[in-house]
Image (tube, rainbow, N blue to C red):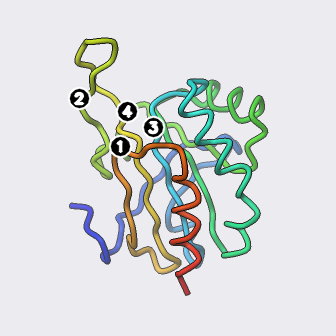
Amino acid sequence: MLTLDHPVDDFVLPSTDGQEFSLIANAGKNLVIYFYPKDNTPGCTTEGEDFRDNWHAFTEKNCVIVGISRDSIKSHENFKEKMKFPFELLSDVDETVCKLFHVMKMKNMYGKQVRGIERSTFVIDAQGILRKEWRGVKVPGHVREVLDFVNTLQ
């Protein structure tokens, strides 16, 4: 069970940099993981742009940003290139990490119940401890709120 102020289990996912991303490989850095429903959709594009536009402020705080969805690496590569994201996108097609973070939910889409990713963000500190989570994220102002929290980390 994922719990605030407790360590997060390591995971490995394919990344748009052609490598595998793992928590252990990022030890010693603060980490923002944002889960989003789908590449190239309006809310997901805006959220990614907000993280992109604030990327330098995050990196100044020893913070790595990664986005995760169930899209393929190919889809992620195209999305990342099109939007000029300076951070990596991770592909979780089998939902392993989505399940670890409990972000798979039933949602209403055009009047139908569909299973998908609930837009969520998590901050893990340099020691691998989950320090903050936002679930059911509304995009406007969210990245600023995440950055304000990251600024409180030592």
Q: Which residue is mark 2?
A: 106
Name the element at disc 3.
Answer: loop
Q: Nearer the viewer, mark 1 or mark 4?
A: 1
- Amino acid carrying label 1: it is Cys
Task: Residue at 43%, 31% (x, y): give it.
Answer: 93
Tell me, for residue 94, which label it has, or none.
4
Tell me, for residue 98, which label it has, or none.
1
Q: Whole-percent x and y of residue 46?
A: 62, 37
- Amino acid carrying label 3: it is Asp
How dense is the environment of label 4, judged by Cα within 10 Å: few (below 14), some, or many (20 and up)? few
Task: Residue at 38%, 47% (x, y): give it.
Answer: 97
Asked if labels 3 and 1 touch by Cβ distance under 8 angstroms, the answer is yes
- Amino acid carrying label 2: it is Met
Q: Whole-percent x and y of residue 25?
A: 57, 66
Asked if labels 2 and 4 touch by Cβ distance under 8 angstroms, the answer is no
Is 61 situated left or right of 149 in this image?
A: right
